Amino acid sequence: MYELINNLKINYEIYGEGKPILLLHGWGGSINSLKNLALELSKKNYKVFIIDIPGFGDSSKPNKDFTLKDYADIVEEFLQKKRLNSLNVFGHSFGGSVAIKMSVSNKLIIKKLILCNSSGIRDIDDKKVNKIKRISKLIRRIFYLPILRSMYPRLRKFFYYYILRERDYINHQEIAGTFKKVVKEDLTPYLERIKIPVLLLWGENDKHTPIEYADIMDRNIKSSQLKVIRGAGHDLPLRKPKIVGNEIDKFINDR
């Protein structure tokens, strides 16, 4: 199904009936990333909405370099069109950053927020971005000579994939400007403005958004609780949808 928001086609799916909850996938993901989680929640009396965030899946690519606020505005307008003015929100990784922005905008009533291996803490990411820039400049200089230029794309991909392990950046070059804006924004100042109950759901072995992120969020969000899943990594909701679904259900129904 599709909804047109600000001239962007937004692909979405709905599962089940009951309490409304929105699932927001991570960077490079799509509806399919969280479909198994949606099916688990639909068995527990939830009406689950999943969207392909602009630039991913079957939704349109952004018509400019988006910021996190741009993404939040699009999602909020989608929900308003669906008359979902009061609901729960789950955000995984990049989707968690969008959800944080939504939680402080006051455009909707978000009852409870679940941040799963969420991005948004940039003290570590700043070092990562600077490293990417240095490596990229070095590669360009080495392969500036015409005789070597034909090798540049393959070597560049090799460095991002296997040395830096920054596959999100290289796999989505068509929205590289958006990626750069998103990873620069530190959401730490927004955390103390979140007044709703928040569940921080984390895989203990996450290498992309490490457990230190969860600790920072837990310290700064007034009404938060942290649940660490042993043996899980960054792809927690994809690998363990049943465990995640159970934790979400317990949190939402806990009065």
Image (tube, helix red, strand yellow):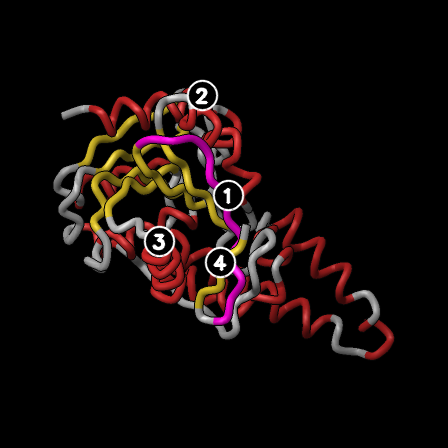
Q: Are marks 3 and 2 in contact (CB under 8 Å)?
A: no
Mark 2 nearby-residue class (10 Å; few <14, some 14–19, many ≥20): some
Residue ID at (41%, 37%): 48
Counting residues from the start of the chain, the first of labels 3 and 2 encountered is: 3
Q: Are marks 3 and 4 in contact (CB under 8 Å)?
A: no
Query: How much space separates mark 1 and mark 3, taking CA atoms?
Result: 13 Å
Please state which amino acid type lies under the numbered disc 3: Leu
**Disc 1 on helix, strand or loop?**
strand
Counting residues from the start of the chain, the first of labels 3 and 4 encountered is: 4
Mark 4, mark 2: which one is toward the viewer? 4
Residue stretch rendered in magenta on the structure = 7-18
Residue 175: image location, x then y, percent: 56, 66
Query: How much space separates mark 3 and mark 2, taking CA atoms?
Result: 26 Å
Residue 188: image location, x then y, percent: 25, 54
Classified by dominant secondary structure, the portion drawn in magenta counts as: strand
Q: Is residue 121 left or right of residue 59?
A: left
Residue 186: image location, x then y, percent: 31, 59
Q: Are marks 4 and 1 in contact (CB under 8 Å)?
A: no
Counting residues from the start of the chain, the first of labels 4 and 2 encountered is: 4
Q: Is residue 136 left or right of residue 146?
A: left
Please state which amino acid type lies under the numbered disc 1: Glu
Q: Are marks 1 and 2 in contact (CB under 8 Å)?
A: no
Query: How much space separates mark 4 and mark 1, taking CA atoms?
Result: 11 Å
Mark 3, mark 2: which one is toward the viewer? 3
Reading the image, the residue beneath label 3 is: 79
Query: For residue 3, which numbered disc appears in the image?
Result: 4
Q: Is residue 115 magenta?
A: no
> Can you say whether 2 is above or below 49 in the image?
below
Q: Are marks 4 and 2 in contact (CB under 8 Å)?
A: no
Query: For residue 242, which numbered disc appears in the image?
Result: 2
Residue ID at (31%, 52%): 83
